[in-house]
């Protein structure tokens, strides 16, 4: 499949576990110009399947007809590859995390601004119809004042050695919580448990305290007996649950529980959950389309470099908290 005349021409860098999904979606949108991977046999395989060219990374960013790159390489390569692509004048969509240090994240934003190019970070769930509906409800005040948010992202695998479970799983949860609260936390406290390796945390719990009184809690593990992807938002007037493991018509549920005081005692009354109607769509395809639209218009992405940097600051604060065993002030 060659790139559509109405779409920018994009090279996907990395076609492994996650990258192959990006190749498929960019191709389905008529924008796949090239595929690149450290394993050029894999690159040639996907290039042939979708009618694109197999190029090395250097060839891809040097190609005049390639306007943007989508980077799905190992996390430790994100900052280097994204920076080189920006310096070559390409628009960049880089998978999470955008970098491994705040300084590298800030440098990417500066290079994107200098090049006048789009820098987008792959925080997939920001494009999920259920989360978008939840965010709209929160901003409209449907839940009342938000009191606390918790997120569980649990599974048996995919276990990594180059990054701990927090850096691998939690960027999605941090991104969603920051969007819902609308600000960075003031304090971060995190704990990691190390079972398979003394240097790589397999289970982490993280608490975030915000200036507006909201608390955020994140529990991630790749040593869990079952898969769970659940975000719970508790407000004064209602509560909402985004459970991505459920069928589409059940993914977002609103609970209009009430609490009344009787003789000095709070008495809750549970309400039946209301399933929120959603338009079914593949979040990754929506995310890829957003990148292409931003490339064409020059508009900032919803998950632009600034949003990616906010997530990176929380990741770094939690990492410091785990290492030092204390609360970190942002």
Image: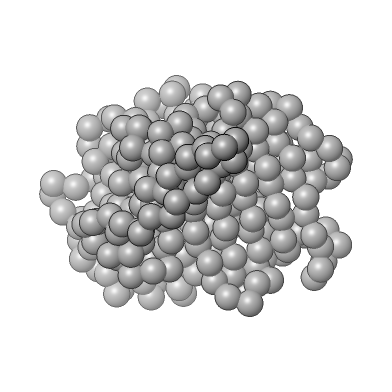
User: In the visual, does 96 lie left or right of 156?
Assistant: left
Look at the picture and state if 61 lies above or below 199: above
Look at the picture and state if 22 lies above or below 114: below
Which residue is depicted at the point 74% across and 40% down? 189
Q: Quadrant of the C terminus?
A: top right
Q: Quadrant of the N terminus?
A: bottom left
Q: Residue furthest left?
A: 5
Tell me where residue 260 appears, x and y as whole percent. Answer: 48, 40
Residue 184, visible in the rendered structure: yes
User: In the visual, does 252 lie left or right of 192?
Assistant: left
Tell me where residue 55 appears, x and y as whole percent. Answer: 41, 59
Of residues 193 and 36, the one nearer the viewer is 193
The number of numbered badges drawn on the structure is: 0
Tell me where residue 37 appears, x and y as whole percent. Answer: 48, 63
Of residues 5 and 238, the one nearer the viewer is 238
Residue 84, visible in the rendered structure: no
Which residue is depicted at the point 65% across and 33% down? 209
Q: Quadrant of residue 215?
A: top right
Tell me where residue 214 appears, x and y as whole percent. Answer: 57, 33
Which residue is depicted at the point 38% across and 55% down? 271
Which residue is depicted at the point 79% across and 35% down? 327
Q: Residue furthest front?
A: 263
Look at the picture and state if 273 lies above or below 44: above
């Amino acid at each position: 499949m060659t790139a559509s005349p109405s779409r920018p021409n994009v090279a996907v860098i990395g076609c492994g576990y996650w990258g192959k999904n990006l190749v498929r979606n960019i191709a389905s949108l008529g924008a796949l110009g090239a595929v690149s991977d450290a394993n050029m046999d894999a690159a040639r395989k996907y290039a042939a399947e979708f009618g694109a060219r197999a190029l090395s990374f250097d060839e891809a960013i040097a190609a005049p007809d390639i306007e943007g790159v989508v980077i799905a390489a190992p996390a430790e390569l994100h900052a280097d590859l994204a920076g080189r692509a920006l310096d070559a004048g390409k628009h960049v969509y880089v998978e999470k995390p955008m970098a491994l240090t705040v300084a590298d994240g800030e440098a990417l934003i500066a290079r994107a601004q200098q090049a006048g190019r789009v820098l987008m970070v792959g925080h997939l769930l920001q494009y999920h119809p259920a989360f978008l509906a939840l965010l709209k409800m929160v901003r409209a005040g449907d839940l009342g004042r938000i009191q606390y948010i918790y997120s569980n992202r649990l599974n048996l695998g995919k276990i990594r050695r180059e990054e701990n479970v927090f850096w691998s799983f939690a960027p999605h949860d941090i991104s969603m919580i920051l969007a819902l609260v609308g600000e960075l936390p003031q304090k971060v406290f995190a704990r990691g448990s190390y079972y398979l390796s003394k240097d790589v945390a397999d289970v982490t719990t993280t608490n975030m305290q915000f200036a507006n009184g909201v608390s955020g809690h994140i529990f991630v593990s790749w040593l869990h007996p079952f898969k769970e992807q659940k975000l719970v938002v508790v407000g004064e007037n209602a509560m909402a649950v985004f459970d991505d493991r459920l069928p589409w018509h059940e993914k977002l549920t609103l609970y209009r529980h009430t609490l009344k005081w009787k003789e000095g005692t709070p008495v809750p009354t549970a309400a039946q959950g209301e399933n929120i109607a959603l338009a079914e769509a593949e979040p990754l395809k929506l995310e890829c389309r957003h990148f292409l639209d931003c490339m064409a218009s020059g508009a900032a992405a919803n998950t632009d470099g600034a949003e990616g940097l906010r997530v990176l600051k929380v990741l770094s604060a939690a990492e410091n908290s785990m290492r030092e065993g204390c609360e970190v002030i942002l």
